[in-house]
Amino acid sequence: MNLDRRLRRSAEEAENLFKSKPVPSLPERRPWGPVVVVATALVVLAVFGLVAVFTEPDDSGPAVTGTPSTSTTIPPTTTIGESSGVEPLRLDDGVSLVPVEMEDGTRIAVLLPTELVPGRVEVDAGSSSAELEGPGFHGALSYAFCPGDTQDAGSLNIHGALVAQLSDRLVVCRPDQVMTLDIFTNGDAPTRSPEAFNLVPMDLGTEYLAVIEASNQSPFCCDAFGPLRTGPLVITANRFTSGEITAWDYETLVPQWTTSIGNSSILLGSLGDLVVATPGRGGLVGVDADNGEIRWELGFPQDEEVVGVGNETGGSIWYISTEFPNEGAVAAPHLRAVDVEFGELMWMTEGRPGTLLQWVDPAVFPDLVVVMDVPRFVAGQDTSTTSHLIAFDRTTGEQVWTTDLDDPTEAFSDRLLGNDPDTSVLIAATPDGEVFSIDPETGQILWRTETGFVRIIELDTSTVRLQQGESETQLDLQTGDQINR
């Protein structure tokens, strides 16, 4: 899970991700260079700041919850070339839901003001784009970043969607999910609050996942905000614009419940009928997937935020890495073992003071859990350190070993650790493009090699596959020799 610090970026940053800036102000889910430098940022779009985008907005805005006033069975949409009418699902407070099923298998709930879709909507969907035709509007849906001209013309609503009225069209887009809907109306823009608009992915198809991967957006989409499938439900979160988590019926797309967990909502995963989330900073929350009730809360200091989550498939003990990202902070990052079934803290341990954590989940082995840190540059303080791997005992939290990766750069990526607990393989890469094979029992470096490739995208019994931009290479797992380029 790649979380708060990585996710707090504006739509413009999402469109122009992973640009470098000079060391030492350094700091994926860039095109990648030998040194990846990504600036940490807060979302700067002012929520509700440009309500004038709409004519006579309703400040209260509709809540995207409740039960429909018509049938809960949604007619299937069609693939391209087979356009036919779809009856919108009428929700509470003047919001209607138009289901769109793309040719690649992606399913999207398109939420619009009911007055914009008073009748059936024609849906003509391809593998990466769709056309929507209603009585009073035409919509063009695509897997695309928010257009650059929306930055000054719109604002983020409480669902995390950017809504902007441009001179020729209304734009609804998701900066975190590479999805845009252009709406052309036959008359004036709908007189609704921007809260009536949203795009919610319910299933992720092949083409959409390829776009997400190619744009290095995987950390910002899909894991932290959903869709998270739990039984008959799909769970989604609203990022930094509200603390709402919503459950949708997977078959009908009818909203089942909405729960607020704070000022933000980021999904960490699920265990059975339990959804584990964080409000970004200040702790963890366990939510009952069946009814949205909060089962437990586990508090952290208010300025401490979750960075990564590691666990064994189906296991209830999760390893939560956290840090203090505020400017000038030098407190050591933490690692916690939490029994998420009950929200019980098993143990907590510290990393190295004056460091941040790399944007990777802890690597879990039968007896150990491994984290990766990076040096933190703080004005006026000695920061002559390098990135390290640190292993802790899974039962006690005691430090077992630490390994210096000899990288002094404060730079971040999301796929720098690869591990196979069954074969005791641990591969680490640095943002400078050096790759290490580590004995997870002792921390000994078995081999190291310069590749210029920084993202570990696949690890099997004989090779490790790496990525740099659109290029890939493979290394021999035993020797580190490059197999092809």
Image (spheres, rainbow, N blue to C red):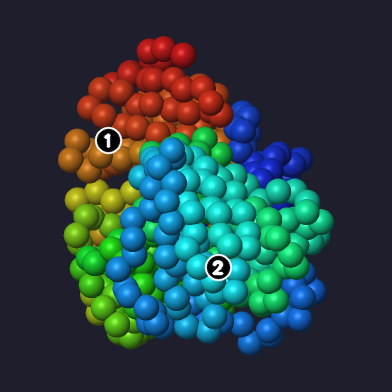
Q: Secondary structure at mark 2?
A: loop
**To which quarter of the image does residue 297 belong?**
bottom left
**To which quarter of the image does residue 49 belong?**
bottom right
The residue lying at 75 percent from left, 72 percent from top is: 54
Q: Position of residue 447 (x, y in %)?
A: 38, 24
Q: Secondary structure at mark 1?
A: strand
Spatial distance from mark 1 to mark 2, Cα to Cα? Answer: 55 Å
The residue tagged 1 is 425
The residue lying at 42 percent from left, 51 percent from top is: 84
Give the number of callouts.
Answer: 2
The residue lying at 39 percent from left, 58 percent from top is: 202
Q: Are marks 1 and 2 in contact (CB under 8 Å)?
A: no
Judged by depth in the image, the label closer to the viewer, 1 or 2, is: 2
The residue tagged 2 is 117
The residue lying at 58 percent from left, 62 percent from top is: 135
Query: In this view of the protein, can residue 20 be seen by the observer?
Result: yes
Q: Nearer the viewer, residue 155 or 1?
A: 155
> In what quadrant of the picture does the N terminus appear?
bottom left
User: Could you classify mark 1 by the number of other residues whose Cα lies within 10 Å: few (under 14), some (14-19), or many (20 or more)?
Assistant: many
Tell me the kind of residue under disc 1: Val
